[in-house]
Image: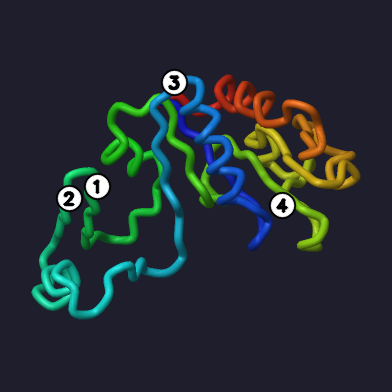
Amino acid sequence: MRLITVIGIKNAGKTTLTVALASEYVRRGRRVMTIKHGHHPADVDRPGSDTFRHFREARAERTLIAAPDLRVLFERTADDYDAVALARRYMDGADIVLCEGYKRAALPKVEVWRKVIGGRPIYDPAAPNAKEWVALVVDDRTAGEDARCPVLAFSDTNWLQTLANLVWERALIL
């Protein structure tokens, strides 16, 4: 199993890039699984639903809703934000696991940056973890002029295919 994380500042397009990259791997016949890192507890149940009652009212440790083509697991756990541990526990059988977030984790990273959002990329070529960056995906090449990793622009021909190849080569192998 390979593991990589997609990072960026808020509203930079992390989800859009993760979805595009996952779709490219599926097109290539790979088994793709994803992990979304959040800073707030997930609240996907609506009050009164059966899963809400099982998990929140009854305080079950785990609640699994199983439908013919979908399963969702609600689980109480300590703050386990370790992407590697989560991938090993829940993503068995994946060819590649794409994480969204985990910018502080010591994982290979793809950063998405768009000029319209403002600020600078998270990537800093002088930082001790700069070698974790697999690529910087930007809408303005000037954002990556000092980068020591590949810089791909959305306007590049085949940027997604190139990124998928880079990620496959540099992902953490578990």
On residue 67, the disc is 2
Q: Specify few, some or many for label 1: CA neighbours under 10 Å numbering under 14, 14-19, or 20 or more.
A: few
On residue 29, the disc is 3
Counting residues from the N terminus, which is met first, the one under dot 1 or under dot 3? 3
Gap in Å between the C-alphas at discs 1 and 3? Answer: 21 Å
Gap in Å between the C-alphas at discs 4 and 1? Answer: 36 Å
* Residue at the disc numbered 1: 70
Q: Amino acid at mark 1?
A: Leu
Left or right of 156, for residue 80: left
* Residue at the disc numbered 4: 122
Q: Residue at x 79, y 43 (%)?
A: 126
Res 135 quadrant in image: top right
Secondary structure beneath disc 2? strand
Q: Amino acid at mark 4?
A: Ile
Gap in Å between the C-alphas at discs 4 and 3? Answer: 32 Å
Disc number lying in front (4 or 1): 1
Q: Position of residue 154 (x, y in %)?
A: 77, 39
- Mark 4 touches mark 1? (CB < 8 Å): no
Residue 76, relative to residue 162: is it above or below? Answer: below
Counting residues from the N terminus, which is met first, the one under dot 4 or under dot 1? 1
Q: Amino acid at mark 2?
A: Ala
